[in-house]
Amino acid sequence: MLLLAVILAVPPLFERIRLPGLVGLLVAGVVLGTNGLNWLSTESETMSLFSDIGKIYLMFVAGLEIDLDQFRRTRNRSLGFGLATFGFPMTMGILLGRLFDFDWNASVLIGSLLASHTLLAYPIVRRLGVVADEAVTVTIGATIFTDISALLVLAVCVGINQGDFSAFSLGFLLISLGIYAVGVLFGLDRLGKSFFRRTKHDQGNQFLFVLLSVFVASVAAQLIGVEQIVGAFLAGLAVNDVLGDSPVKEKVEFIGSVLFIPIFFVDMGLLLDLQAFVQTLDTLGLAVAIVGGLLLSKFLAALAIKLIYRYNWPQTLTMWSLSVPQVAATLAATVVGYQEGILNEAVFNSVILMMLVTAVVGPLVTTRAAAKLSPHALDELPSEEALEAGVGRTRAQEETVVVPVYNPQTERFLLELAAVLARSREGRIVPLAIAKAQERMDAPEMNRAIDRCRDLLAQAQAISNELAVVATPQLRIAGNVAEAINHTSREEEASLIVLGMGRYVDLQARLFGNITDRVLRSAHCPVAIARLLGSPLDLKGILVPVENVEVARRQLDFAQRLALENGGQVTLLNVCHPQTSKRAQALLYEQLLALAGQIAAPVPTDVQVVPQEDVISSIVRVSGDYDLVIVRSQRLRIGADGLAIGSFTKPLLERLPCSVILLGDPHE
């Protein structure tokens, strides 16, 4: 009860005072532990079990969140920076360990703690629109090298600590570790792909398979004499390609991020001796040396890469700031080293301080340095052919819009929206009514469902005739509504699916899958999810918030077709970071103008670039002057630190006062 209450209440309170949620969990552990109220103990079986699972989950999610596509694109340079940003801190840590009279094993482990990094500031570079900058992609790719190398060093140090050291035992450990790593990375990858092909849409069994893989890999790591978290991280890398961006990945991450990983951070607070921590701050020697050594060595690594690859200073500082934060791998390895007796309390406390400092310094520097990077130049925008292909069908092809009808109260507005879009390209609409299948086809419930569907289709046909659009109504009997929608859309070669939604997207439904979510994930074509407060025929002012110019084409095309039908106008809005330079803002403005000019529809289109910190509040404020906001649907993402569920769409929908359409692309 206490753990769940802490996880629920404490992080939001700390985030309100501009402190990371994980700091709140650490503080809660100190307050509730033996140094405070003594309500929780790290020695209890419950705490030990959940904390161990959280530690494993933390490293598994860290492996799962690494972008392997980014790594493959910049493999050589990522390895170069990975070697530098691992080698410099590793050397610095060993020197510091020896300077403060630690033995060689502890010194090497301290070096490995400084060598890894967590991409805590990745959301910042994403919002600034500079993720495609080579310096950023190289840093992202380097994460895989630094984390694996740091965990391998941990495995060797723990192995040496647990037995008599000899060249033979060290060689045997390294060989075993190599064979194990190859077996996990390639074995789980192939086995996972085969299992997912066989189970297809059985998300329950796929979820269990992934969990089993994590713990099998962790147990196998123990059997060969290395730490569990090594196996968990390798398991995350192994199933990375298997899961992709599937709903199973969200479920796996969700369970860890809202339960087990927060408990791990609470347990770290229980381990933290407040008096010893204060004494560490009083003496400051080791703590300052570790924090300063980390910052200096990471900077030297970025500087070396600047000289080799000829990066400019904003790129160099961005690489440095992205590689500075120490959260996931560092904290997990520190706890292991402390529990194994390799590291003492002073090092443990110093690492906690290092985590707090770097978690603040890294994102702050990233905000300023990455803002000076240039977004994609105009000549890097997608070609007209690529843009047309991105819309799904060319203008010369017929537009076919599938509209599932279920609620008579919203049916008319959805059909009007579909009709406007279909008419703009001389297409047709497909009203679709789905009767839920019963075990017996002659059951009374089945008869009532079919009669209701026929009534809905008759209404849809009448509305279609009134709107002067060709309609081909379809009635389907199916056990799975989402599958029926997607199958019909594919059979009809639909170019768009139009769905209705409630007042807001429910978080539980987003996580565990509602019909809309399953349609979006499986559809072969774009999906428009509409919350219409009035008739689409009366929508005059249309606002299109744009985060990324490269993928905004569908939003603008959609908006201009509606505006053309209604004699309205469109406004493109980009809310950039306040630190974005004037030059970068001007370039964004030019890009948006160029994008608007690529569409031939004669619709008045305005462009606004607004530097503001709070994106959602800025969009809501501007939306007060418009009838409709068209938003690109953003899928639920869970942060690599396991403490924040990033959901931009849900709070925006809750606050928008006007009609809204979410455009989802199944091929993101």
Image (spheres, helix red, strand yellow):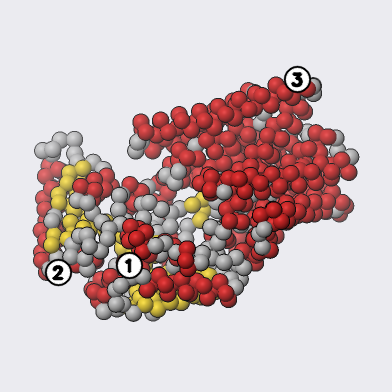
Give the side of residue 348 with respect to residue 522, left or right.
right
Question: Label for residue 168?
Answer: 3
Give the side of residue 104 with respect to residue 339, left or right.
right
In front: mark 1 or mark 2?
1
Mark 2 nearby-residue class (10 Å; few <14, some 14–19, many ≥20): some
> Which residue sits at x=57%, y=53%?
137
Is the Cβ of the residue at disc 3 closer than 8 Å to that at disc 2? no
User: Is residue 586 or residue 163 the one in the foreground?
Assistant: 586
Q: Position of residue 123 (x, y in %)?
A: 56, 58
Q: Position of residue 530 (x, y in %)?
A: 31, 63
Give the side of residue 577 with respect to residue 316, left or right.
left
Q: Residue 260: which quarter of the image?
A: top right
> Which residue sits at x=74%, y=44%?
87
Query: Helix, strand, or loop for circle 3?
Result: helix
Is the Cβ of the residue at disc 1 closer than 8 Å to that at disc 3? no
Q: Position of residue 41 (x, y in %)?
A: 69, 39
> Which residue sits at x=26%, y=79%?
567
Q: Earlier in the sequence, mark 3 or mark 2?
A: 3
Can residue 70 be seen in the rendering of this structure?
yes
Query: Helix, strand, or loop for circle 1?
Result: helix
Question: Label for residue 467?
Answer: 2
Q: Earlier in the sequence, mark 1 or mark 3?
A: 3
Residue type, numbered disc 3:
Phe
Question: Label for residue 557?
Answer: 1
Mark 3 nearby-residue class (10 Å; few <14, some 14–19, many ≥20): few
Quadrant the N terminus occupies = top right
